[in-house]
Image: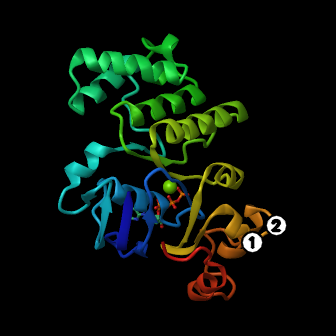
Amino acid sequence: MIKTSALSKTFPGGVEAVRSVDLVVEAGEIVGFLGPNGAGKTTTMRMLTTLVRPTGGTATVAGHDLLADPRGVRRRIGYVSQGGGTDLANPVGEELELHAMLYGMRPAEARDRVGRVLDRFGLTELRERPGGALSGGQRRRFDLAFGLVHDPALLFLDEPTTGLDPQSRAALWDHVRSLRDRLGLTVFLTTHYLDEADALADRLFVIDDGVIVAQGTPAELKGGTGTLDDVFLSITGRSLRDDPPGPPGTDGERQAAHTAGGER
Ligand SMILES: Nc1ncnc2c1ncn2[C@@H]1O[C@H](COP(=O)(O)OP(=O)(O)OP(=O)(O)O)[C@@H](O)[C@H]1O
Ligand SMILES: [Mg+2]
């Protein structure tokens, strides 16, 4: 469903946000993309969703070539960005209908589809409410509905549960799981909650400083000992990412020490 080859992004000014990333995601997988602040998660996701043009490498996403056929990619994916990307002045239902029609649904079909998606996310009562007047958790559910209303095969979620209370987080996990189980949706998500990655993802990639430094199932990465938090800190170090360069330990050494699962 996703296959990248040496995917890279250097921003003007020289920041090498993503460096030669190779990853493969199979249809129907829930994949967690982990890494410290500034590691390159959002940049990778924005490349895979056609919003940022790679400066190197290639990728196939949902059956279409990222560079040759970005429209084809866009038609088959949903993307819920880190900050949410919806117009908050519009009523929730209207915004979703517009989005569905943008993807080629007729008005009646869009209304029907939106009704079902609102129902699934417990938002039916809020259909007439402007997006800006939702609570944080309602807003995140609305964002998720937005990512799904056009029935994509592949859903990208950038920190979908940040700021949610435990109930809303658990509900969102259930939604994501049931979408995969019932519809075969493939999900690629970033999170800083490692318990979430552990519980939800079939497979994990860890990116640090633009480089994939580990990959495998949660069990493989944990290696039978410790929690995912311990493993994450041992792979990516303890220094804050705005600090000056820290203690020794090159990317190469860390990768060699911790890559699990291997290429697929
Ligand atoms: N438009 C841009 N221009 C220049 N540099 C950028 C731009 N966007 C991102 N960067 C830089 O690229 C690097 C990767 O950023 P990115 O947003 O991909 O990180 P992230 O892993 O999503 O982090 P977070 O966990 O904080 O969301 C950072 O150093 C960031 O400052
Ligand atoms: Mg980010």
| CB under 8 Å between discs 2 and 1 | yes
User: Residue at position x 41%, y 26% from top?
Assistant: 88
Which of the two residues, 101 or 113, is positioned nearer the viewer here?
A: 113
- Is ligand 1 less than 8 Å from the beta carbon at label 1? no
- Residue at image mark 2: 226
Image quadrant holding the N terminus, namely bottom left
Residue at position x 34%, y 53% in the image:
49
Which residue, given by chain and number where applicable, does mark 1 sit on? 223
Give the crowd class for mark 2: few <14, some 14-19, many >=20 residues within 10 Å.
Answer: few
Disc 2 within 8 angstroms of ligand 1 (CB): no
Q: Nearer the viewer, residue 10 or 3?
A: 3
Give the residue displayed 72% in from the left and 35% down from the top.
166
Residue 219 image position (x, y, % from top left): 70, 64
**Does residue 152 appear in the picture of this structure?**
yes
Estimate how packed mark 1 is, as few (under 14), some (14 to 19) or many (20 or more) residues with alpha carbons within 10 Å. Answer: some
Describe the colour scheme in one phrase.
rainbow
Q: Is residue 170 left or right of residue 179?
A: right
Quarter of the view holding residue 13: bottom left
